[in-house]
Image: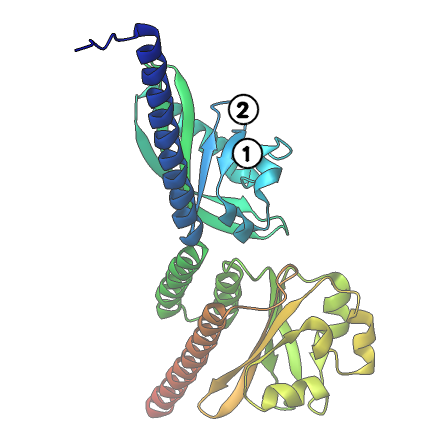
Amino acid sequence: MSKTVSNPAKNGINRQKSCKFLNEMALCNALEMAKELISVINKVPVTVFLWRPEKYWPAEFVSENIKQFGYTVEEFTSGKLLYGNIVYPDDLERVERELSRRIEEDYVDFSQEYRILTKSGEVRWVDERTFIEADENGAIKYLKGIILDITERKRKEKLLYVQRDLGIALSSSNCLNETLEILLDSCLQIDEINAGGIYLIDEATDDMNLAIHRGLSPNFVEHASHYSVNSPNTRLVMIGQPVYKQHIDLLLTSKDEALRQENLRATALIPVKSGKKVIAAFYLASSFEYELPDTVRTVIETITTQFGIFISRIRLEEKLKECLRKRKS
């Protein structure tokens, strides 16, 4: 019987081929898993970044849902845009300082909230979870970030604070002028509103007069400080229903031609009632938003209702004081 002689060289080649095949299979499986992972990431409402630990954080990777902020993946991965470029300028120093502190204290991960700018210039709040990856010598290799848009949550939180603070302030106020300032300043704490005024209805003539204003131009104040009882603007208020329109759509009279150049977009005209009678109106505006969200509208209308309740309370107190005076006399 003949004996089979093994060929070491041939066996070595076969082992190399086998290892190469296994490596290729493992690589293919890893790529498939990576594709599946990226697919999952792109379906959830978060944006994933892989940053180099350099100034303003250049990105090695960013998930496709960066498009929710108006940007493309290529803008970041090409180096054309750095992540620090889109952090809101007033928050950038704090974000840098917080990251440096966490690295110095050997944190592996941490979270922080701050604002970013979308490509269209809109301000959005994000919650960033950062994972710090270091090598065996402790040098930082990468920063991994998961960005979640929390704008709506922050808006609701702020609106709740505005309503709470306003309720406390009104409960201790007995002066109309002071109350008007509190009311208007409360409205201007809302991010979407940066200008406005409060009109009071003259009890004798039913004319509408601008009693207090913020963020409006001298031209606006000059031409829109008084509306007679028969003007379209006053009649619109006297209907007693909130009106949300573009500033340009609220210009109803010939004298409003002077107001067409105002840099205002979304506006709200909210009547204030004491009982069934309209006694005032809020004019609130935004120079950067084209429409006020429903959450903002709800808060504005709540504020005007609180003002109506305040006026009713003040008038009731005045009547009680008058009754007491009559009794004493």
Residue at screen point 49% across, 85% down: 273
Q: Where is residue 316 in the image (x, y as percent from the top left)?
A: 38, 85
Would you name the residue on which mark 1 appears? 84
- State whether residue 274 is above or below residue 197: below
Q: Is residue 137 visible?
A: no
In the rendered structure, the answer to whether residue 48 lies left or right of residue 6 reads right
- State whether residue 194 is above or below residue 59: below
Which quadrant of the view contains residue 108?
Answer: top left
Q: Where is residue 307 in the image (x, y as percent from the top left)?
A: 45, 76
Q: Position of residue 206 (x, y in %)?
A: 63, 89
Q: Can residue 22 be seen in this view?
A: yes
In the rendered structure, the answer to whether residue 109 lies left or right of residue 88 reads left
Would you name the residue on which mark 2 appears? 55
Q: Quadrant of the C terminus?
A: bottom left
In the rendered structure, the answer to whether residue 291 lies left or right of residue 264 reads left
Dot 1 falls on a residue whose secondary structure is helix
Which quadrant of the view contains residue 287?
Answer: bottom right
Distance from disc 1 to disc 2, alpha carbons, whole Å, reads 8 Å
